[in-house]
Amino acid sequence: MRIRSRPEDFRVDEIALYPAAGEGGHTFVRVEKIARTTEEVARALARAAGVAPRDVGYAGRKDRVAVTTQWFSVPGLDPEAALEIPLLGARVLEAARHPHKLRTGHLRGNRFRILVRDVAPAAAAAGAARAEELLRRGLPNRFGEQRFGRDAANAELGRRILRGEPGPRDRRAARFLLSALQAEVFNAVLAARGDAYDRVETGDVAVVHASGGLFVVDDAAREAPRAAAFEISATGPIFGTRVIEPGGEVALRERAALASHGVPAEGLRAPRGVRLRGARRPLRVRPEGLGLEPTAEGLCVSVTLPPGSYATVLLEQLLAAAPDDTAGGGQYPRSPDEEAPDEHREQRL
């Protein structure tokens, strides 16, 4: 089974969190790109507008070996001029003014349409059965291998920054490397959960999906029906200086994961110039609009996932055994500055 044989096989469309207001000092620009990184497009927009690359905002990085659409914000750029900006491997689809910069995470989700080639009929049938289970129990919200960079180096670089060793001068690059270490710890906590990722335990920090609110579970039996109905889910740590702590055995497991990955469980301090507040991430997410359609070229998988969830993880769950190493690493080398596979590498499941 093969994915990303060509960029057109992997389509990603960003779903905006809110529309542009139509007025303000920034311009929201929706760009379609192919075989380009988000950072490359952001730098090109910055040059065209005569601003610093750090002033260009975006909600999240998108795959390079793919056809993707996403929003950027550029200060002081005229919307009409934005429509005429020539971009290598990309084009501006629309532009409108807005009062403020687009920030990381300001998206509702991503819509994927992926062609998986060379799928045997038996594998396609098994995938359809697994899809029903994922809709019922949820998708384990593991960070995909592309999160960790070429040769899985990003988390180690983040660990060095956390220890106070020199890192990139660019704050965005430093935050990205630290976030890879956060992802490594989260994946380790999720792996320790085993097959119970869809249940809650006493001491869990649970999220209410409808509101995003968090609470500590003091009676797992009482909350079990809500978890079964997908009203709530257990969360894992995105470590930082302001994170709600779990209790009981859950806390012990999280502290062990932090220690084994070189992160202090107490007295954590953010590196100079980098905010590291932390958060809680659901251990599972529900795929929306999940569909599997056999075609003459292979199996077309369509799905909408919430921000930060990985279509490659979904494909692994549907069509192949999940990797044994869920704490990072990679069978698919990645560029260190983009959540996408190498430009010339085809992925095999």
Image: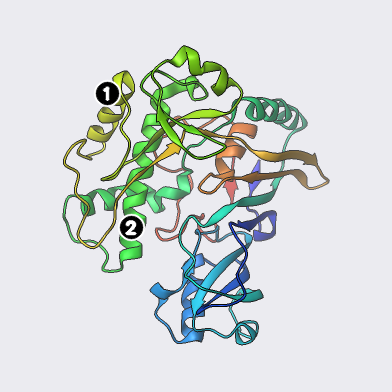
Horizontal and vertical percent position of residue 31: 62, 70
Q: Quadrant of residue 247?
A: top left
Residue at 50%, 59% in the rendered image: 61
Q: Quadrant of residue 164?
A: bottom left
Q: Which mark is residue 175?
A: 2
Horizontal and vertical percent position of residue 307: 53, 49
Q: Judge left or right: residue 255 versus residue 142.
A: left
Q: Quadrant of the C terminus?
A: top right
Q: Which mark is residue 337?
A: none
Residue type at numbered disc 1:
Leu
Q: Quadrant of the N terminus?
A: top right
Residue type at numbered disc 2:
Arg
Mark 2 to mark 1 CA distance (whole Å): 27 Å
Horizontal and vertical percent position of residue 64: 55, 61
Horizontal and vertical percent position of residue 98: 55, 73
Residue linked to disc 1? 252
Q: Is residue 44 visible?
A: no
When the figure is inspected, residue 239 is found, relative to residue 124, above or below; the finding is below
When the figure is inspected, residue 343 is found, relative to residue 178, above or below; the finding is below
Q: Residue extending furthest top?
A: 221
SS category of the residue bearing label 1: helix
